[in-house]
Amino acid sequence: MKKQFGILVTGLLTLVSLLPINLVHAQSEMKRMLVWHAYRGEEKSAFENVVKRYNKKIEDKKIYFKPLAVPYDAYADKISAAIPRGKGPDVFIFAQDRLGGWIEAGNTLESIDFYAEDEELERFPDSLISTMTYNDTLYGLPFNFKMPAMIYNKKLVKNAPKTTDELTALAEKITDKKIGRFGLAYEYSNFFFHSAILNAFGGKVFQEGGLVSTMVSKENIASVEFMLKWFEQHEILPAEPSSSLITSLFNDGKAAIVFSGPWMLGEISPDIDYAIAPMPIINQLGKAMAPWMSVEGLYISKSSKDKEQSYDFIKYLTSYETALVMGEKGQQLPSNIKVWEHEVMQKNTVAMAFKEQMKTAVPMPNYAQMTLMWSPATTAMNKIVKGTASPKAALLEAQNSISKDIMALSKSH
Amino acid sequence: MKAQVVNNRIFSFIVIFTLAYFAFLHGLNDSVSRLYQQSEVDKAVILSGFTAHKMAGSDSLSLQDAALNLKASNERIADIKVLKLRGAKVIASTQDEDKHQSFPFSLPKDQKSFFDEAKKIKSAYGKTKGGQFLNPLVSYQWLDTASNSILRVVYPYLVNDRFKGVLQVDVLTEPKAVSPYYVIDWFILLVLALACLVFFNKKTLSNVNFKYISVSKNTLNTSVYLFLFLCVAVLLCVRLVHNFQIEQSDAINNITELLKSIELVLANTDMLWINRYGLDMQRLDEVSQPFYLQWMASNTQALMAKLFVYILLSSLLLIFFVSGSAAKTRDAFRENRQAYMYVLPAMLGMLVLVFFPFSYGFILSFTDTTMFNESLSFSERFVGFDNYLAILGDFNLFKELDGQTIINYENFYWTLFITICWTVSNVVFAVGLGLLLALALNDSRIKFRWFFRVALILPWAIPNYITALVWKGMFHQQFGVINQVIQIFGFEPIDWFGSVFTSFLTGLTTNVWLGFPFMMVVILGGLQSISTDMYEAAKIDGANRWQQFKYITLPSLKPTLIPAVILSVVWTFNMFNVIYLVSAGEPAGANEILITQAYKIGFEKMQYAYAAAYSVVIFMILLVYGVFQNKVSKVTDANS
Amino acid sequence: MNKLFETENILLIMRYVFVISMTILSLYPIFWVLSLAFSGSQSLSITELPADPSSWDRIRAIIPWPENFSIQNFIDVLTEQQFGRWLFNSAVVAGATTVFGVFLASTSAYAFSRFRFPGRGVGMMTFLVSQMFPGTLMLIPLYVIIVGWLNLENSYIGLVLVYSVTAIPFCVWMLKGYFDTIPKEIEESAIMDGASQAVIFWKIIVPLAKPAIAVTALFSFMAGWNEFILASIFMSEEQLYTAPVGLKFFVGEHSSMWGYFAAGSVIVSAPVVFLFLYLQKYLISGLTSGGVKG
């Protein structure tokens, strides 16, 4: 009896594994276009909803767009594997940080200069268009933007500090290392978050064009020293910060203020009463902290079967009606500026706070060389925080390492 | 039987000669047609440059007339179309379909590829200002129509040295002449081959015994065959190369003639295309000759290299057949058909899915491929052993920082040292723990064994992404559980990721925790092969526990344990996840192992070829270990 | 006599102590995963420590126990996405990998163990060597083979092929080692009785090698069950994703839903535990005599 069961299961498994799966869409005579994204939850359902509306609009063309969610960890690899081999999506969504790399590698992104009309581009702020531009060529339409802002626990912080002096004083009062409570928490050893101070000081990681590393510029050193003051002198920051630690601290009421972006909101526990404000002004500079802004772009793939239709689709995705859905239901910060005048967005205090932060934010560079920067920068920041090297020496080491890698890349041109 | 052997040889001889000859033919054909294409492209580009120069001189009103004139005056120019980049406007066109248009008009959507080419050329032109050429400034494409072949060249359109747009010039190409040499070659070859066969069929060589060297009949036969084959092959090669050079000089004469005919016009212009060759147009006569000679030499070299590879492969094939290895292989297969049938399916899958990716990585490692030059041809990227020299020849184990001398953690030998420590400690602890637990759990007096067994395999069952993260959290300096425990006993908390050794321990602990259940299960399985009778007998002989373990348990476990150990050495050596998730190589990359380093080089620094060379080095180290271990433990041959 | 029993007892107690302490060690991190999964929130809670903690406070702090007990994370994981479907896919792929892999491996291993033929040593080494080339660079070539040449995008077969190939080398070596311990006399007497090679293999060798087959089956299953990156690259239909792919949706670029991830991990590991519960009967010998062995 048992044996027969075993054989039955084996047989069934083999049968199922042999099933041709293309059955799923083989019967339809509609032309299928693919769009890849990495959304889940509300964002995903809002996006799918929008795609459905578009499909209805173009029903008589016998074409439809089909969304596919890909886990973020595999997303870039999947695109790099599929598109240059003529497979993969027609349209895909990705942040601008990979843009330069894909363009340099070639065979991945289609320029949209040919399709885009000037009037259509007027719906976006210039800073967002600049993130989609590489070598004077436009490669995608900005979909939404994200950047860290100041998220604070209302129980511990009554009024959001406007300046860093206020912030430091407040944080010192709240910090009690013995019970593990901190006034401020953010991933200060990660350059993505450190950028807020870096940009305020006028620091840069690369010269214009991305071919020369400027890690050890005096602005960069000053910005790191400023951060170090928080950590060493005022002792308002926890050690070894990671995104999961910061969320844990905030959720347990052990971090009064965190610098983080809209991505964190879903993880905040419902017991915490929080609010969001733009990052404070650095007193000695009189300038506000200016975090890097990350922009998700809508790109047309080189392997797309119908590029004109694809452009029409991404144009639709940035239109007023879509942006409103994505902003309201998908909790995104849409790139279409007109939408922000709508009362739904005006009433959304969280979104409006991030919109406010956008005024000072700096678009993150999209040079291909950016990927060379992260790991040496993290190493340098860890060394500085652990006190094993001075800011200047550590940043110099990082610069040397990055320059060496740039050399290795340009040697092969 | 003997007749069959001879027939086999005749057959293989013919096969090889045919193969080799087709290979040669292909080699020559390929080279000649590439030569033809290259010279046609050169001519077309020169014509386009000439056109662009002419057009740039005329003002925008008469542009269309200039285009029509040029088309009429030169029979090889089929069509001219000028695109202004801003706004994608066609400002002149001789194409039939545009006859009734009024200029300028917007480029139709279906001709987007033209616009894309223009964009590419513009960005290449932008980059030339830095003094370096990253991309060719001219692009071309073959269009095949029914009657004749057309080359479509897209060329920058400059007015007063400012980039305005592009010209698309369709140039008629000259038909390719058929080469007359092949038939003769065929004939020569056939005669030679037949002569060889007749000779060898009559005379079979016997064993030769010199004073000190004895040569078997087989070796002698093979060498004579090989010698003959090589003679014929070299003869053919010489002929081929000679023929090729004749064709080549024809092509070059053709080009120089064209250049001379339009030389006057070109004298004052900056011919962008010429930069491809690094030539100065004004000194065309002096420079072009040596340049073309050089070009010719490199082309001939490429052809000879190709021929060399063909000869080498054919020789190997010849040896394989003539020496009787082929027959032996076939016989071996016949005799052991059953064994091979059992092994074949698994082996086949293995070869397809492992051999190809490996060759891909192996070949890649001899280039300088990075993200930026992936699209270049293989020969342009080939760098030989440079990557290996850079990895293995870098002995800078120390560097200066802040006036202090510190260890250079990026150095290969440091990483290798850490990798070996990592692998050895992991495997020792995992096998040790697995063995002890398996032995303990094999004792039927222990109650609830099923519970312990299940509890102990859980670290293997749960996705390690989350458990690695929990471990990382447990090692946190301020909030980690481990430091809490240390504080319970009154010690100071440890900065786990701060020093090389403690950070190493975090990875080690996590990986041993993840790895011991597998070892335990393997050993539990292995223990089942030991009959309890053996222990009973040993007890009667008065063996103590340790002796029983040493003389019965361990030897009986060996056949299953050794493979598990070898494989877990391999897996641990390449264990990417745990390092990446737990210690992330902290502090300052000191705890990276070879595989995480290779990943960083490939995916963060985008130096694909260098990363591939790293992987090949990893592979070689493991291969040496595997062969050595196999020799020592003789596990492939163990049989009770 | 009495004394002997005492040392036996002490040894037994030592064994108990060892096994129990190892069990606690192996379960402790898992309890943290469980406590996160059942907490209903997305972050591990950081335990309250008073300003001057006593040892007792610290001990309480290190016990993984969620403040609020909730199964919300499990509900969300199972309902937000088609997690059930993905588990089914995983089961099909890992199950087929097990059947396919163990079958191919056992025939090969049998040949390696029982026949002497040219290329045997090289063949064994080939299996081993195949594990040595680091996988990170294999992604693109594997994509080219599976999707480009074999056209097996969106097909279970592609994944089963790749997973089997990763599992087979260990299985072959393990089984070959085990087959070596089975005495040849058994087969020889069967040949005398006129049994064919296939009968010997299926009726005699395979039943005797059950413990090793159980181990290799578990191993092959795990090779297919927890793999993430290839599954997410070869599958381009959401309903064809496997469970590990589904889990990874909870890990984003900057943020991760660790509560969901932990709950999902618990669900994903349950089938493995059941499989092991089923297979472990082959891993118990205890004091029963090994039948035909020896």
Image (tube, coloured by chain):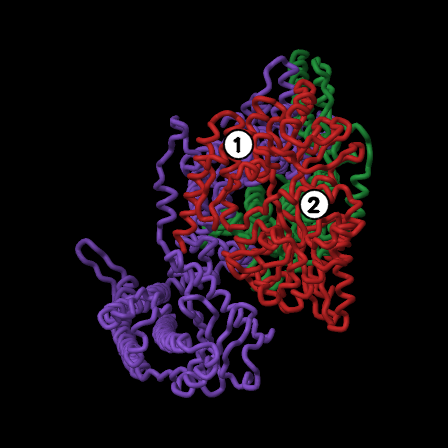
Question: Residue drawn at (77%, 67%), measured in percent from left and top?
Answer: A57
Q: Is residue C265 above or below residue B334?
A: above
Rendered image quadrant of residue C38? top right
Separation of disc 2 and disc 1 at Cα?
27 Å
Q: First in sequence: mark 2 or mark 1?
A: 1
Chain corresponding to red in the figure:
A
Front one among C271 and A90 = A90
Q: Among all residues in the image, which is located at the extreme left?
A: B211
User: Dot 2, crowdedness within 10 Å: few (<14), some or many (≥20)?
Assistant: many
For the residue marked with disc 2, what is the amino acid? Lys
Q: Which residue is mark 1?
A: A224
Front one among B553 and A286 = A286
Residue B574 in the image: state x and y as whole percent.
Answer: 52, 41
* Secondary structure beneath label 1: helix
- Total labels: the figure holds 2
Q: Is residue B1 above or below residue C146?
A: below
Residue A299 in the image: state x and y as whole percent.
Answer: 62, 59
Question: Residue drawn at (74%, 58%), measured in percent from left and top?
Answer: A320
Q: Colour of chain C?
A: green
Q: Chain of mark 2?
A: A
Residue B78 in the image: state x and y as whole percent.
Answer: 45, 84
Left or right of B362 on screen, residue B468: right
Residue A277 in the image: state x and y as whole percent.
Answer: 71, 37
Label at residue A242: none
Q: Which residue is mark 2?
A: A355
Q: Is residue A138 above or below residue A158?
A: below
Whether residue B116 is visible, yes or no, is: yes
Q: Do the residues under discs 2 and 1 have CB atoms within 8 angstroms? A: no
Question: Residue drawn at (22%, 61%), measured in percent from left and top?
Answer: B208
Q: Colour of chain B?
A: purple
Left or right of A198 on screen, residue B469: right
Q: Chain of mark 1?
A: A
